[in-house]
Image (cartoon, rainbow, N blue to C red):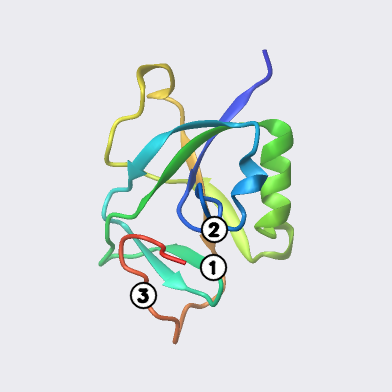
Amino acid sequence: MPRQYLIFVYGTLKRGFCRAHFLAGQSFLGEALTLPRYRMYNCGTYPGLQLAEDGLEILGEVWSVDEACLVLLDQVEEVDTGLYSRAVIQLARPLPEPVRNTPVEAYFYRPSVAGFPDCGEQWID
């Protein structure tokens, strides 16, 4: 059985948003809420997530994706250019039993967010 990876998405990759098609054929596990350690900023047409001492709980979705999808998502999120990096995120709500002890990763925005508006707890396009 191919290895699966857990990804937390919080913006344009969520169901119903413009980049949701990149998750076609993958498994939606449910909505999730992060611990209050992050801030999400409006970077124009997409959000950027960063660690923050005065963080909020961020609402998003958890997906189980295969390696091919993970490679594609890294390209979409421009990991190779340094726009985003993929790292473990801490969630507040427990995941279903089969994946509870598996690390969940998210895409973190790397450039400065100075001057960008804070999105609050949820990205609304």
Residue at label 3? 118
- Amino acid at the residue labelled 3: Asp
Upstream in sequence: badge 2 or badge 3 = 2
Residue at label 1? 46
Upstream in sequence: badge 1 or badge 3 = 1
Upstream in sequence: badge 1 or badge 2 = 2
Residue 88 vertical placement versus 95 (above, below): below
Rendered residue at 41%/62% (across/down): 123
**1 and 2 marks in contact (CB < 8 Å):** yes
Along the line of sight, the residue nearer the viewer: 25 or 92: 25
Name the spot of residue 83 as percent of width and height, x first: 64, 66
Name the spot of residue 8 as percent of width and height, x first: 47, 44
Residue at label 2? 12
Q: How many marks?
A: 3
Instruction: Look at discs 1 and 3 and give the one toward the viewer.
Output: 1
* The quadrant where residue 82 appears: bottom right
Residue sitting at the far top: 1
Residue sitting at the far bottom: 115
Q: Secondary structure at mark 2?
A: loop
Q: Secondary structure at mark 3?
A: loop
